[in-house]
Image (cartoon, coloured by chain):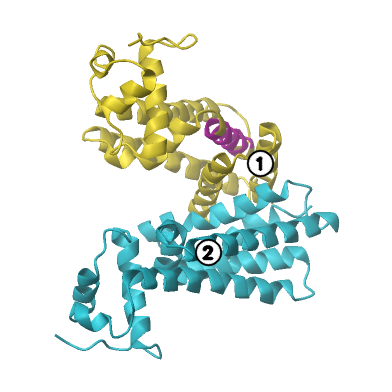
Chain colours: A cyan, B yellow
Amino acid sequence: MARIKAVGTGSKKDTITKKAAALFRKKGFASTSMRELADNIGVEAASLYNHIGSKNELLQTICFTIANAFTIQLEKVAGTTASNISKLESLIRFHIQMMLRSYDEVFVANHEWKQLQEPFLTNFLSQRKNYENALVGIVQDGIKKNELKKLDPYVVVLTLLSAVRGLEFWQRHKKNLDATKLENDMVNHLIKGLIK
Amino acid sequence: MARIKAVGTGSKKDTITKKAAALFRKKGFASTSMRELADNIGVEAASLYNHIGSKNELLQTICFTIANAFTIQLEKVAGTTASNISKLESLIRFHIQMMLRSYDEVFVANHEWKQLQEPFLTNFLSQRKNYENALVGIVQDGIKKNELKKLDPYVVVLTLLSAVRGLEFWQRHKKNLDATKLENDMVNHLIKGLIK
């Protein structure tokens, strides 16, 4: 069988992780075997272990790469002097882009995190909770500064994140619409709906 | 063991269906046995069959009761002379109320419909597609009549339905917020966000 090919500028580990994300999304983490992953890449199962330690490690890599991408973006946006409404808009645009560009990985992080083992499970949940709390904080500050309607901040964050997550259905049905138009329309609806 | 008690004004079949919905939501349809359902009600499994034909029949009853509730509400609202924005508001309020009041049943209809057998599966999907198309039609008419922002109608409907579905997380965490305030805040955000 062939050797594992590095894709673009990524490493062989990146190639394996990307294929794993696609399989975990389609079949679920529990139902995907390392043998199947190897078959899918076109190599012997044994050669996967030259690059990664285990199936669990692949799930950890996927979940934490996604969680970190959101945390880094949040820190970048939170550190600016932009208005709270601009911060929310920028974060929601990032969510939509991630959903469209890294769909397999985001889907796995959203659905298969339950299969993480400790201490990773607790760490993942705590990172997600911190992220949500930071979003709630931005909404609260926006209400305090009279930028946003006086709505329950938790309900606002739940509405925003759920709406974005709904793009899973979009991905599944591959509707014929430009990604930029999709992003602009969702932002227009969801972010403008918060302005007083 | 005891006899099946009718709850409120409902029949014994209603009691069984309600318990089934709660179990199917918690454990999944496939993992719930009729024996477990009987144990949960506190009767012999055999006595369930005096009231219902099979586990499949229970799933059909749950899925179509929910689908019909939405279809009936849609027909009621669509037949009025209200503006399109009022129609959308009224339907979204109904979705939120259903999610809060009939959570088990709505959850099962949202997640376990895949387990329906033919011809019920096709029928359910077609009813759901018609419902979504009718919502898209209301949004299209609202845009045409200049009531609503010019957004992609399919994106609008996906955003609305996904946001409402996000109340699953709400239900799971039982946040301490009045149902009316929750409904009003979501409507203020999601429906006002559509007005030009």
A158 lies left or right of A55 = right
Say which quarter of the image contains residue B106.
Answer: top left
- Identify the residue under disc 2: A124
Q: Quadrant location of the N terminus of chain A?
A: bottom left
Q: Chain of mark 1?
A: B
Q: Chain of mark 2?
A: A
Camera-side residue: B137 or A116? Answer: A116
Disc 1 marks a residue whose amino acid type is Val
Q: Position of residue A98 (x, y in %)?
A: 50, 69
Camera-side residue: A20 or A123? Answer: A123
Q: Residues within 10 Å of mark 2 (few under 14, many from 20)?
A: many
The residue that appears at 63% across and 63% down in the rendered structure is A131
Camera-side residue: A81 or B36? Answer: B36
Q: Which residues are magenta?
A: B86-99
**What element does badge 2 sit on?**
helix
Disc 2 marks a residue whose amino acid type is Phe
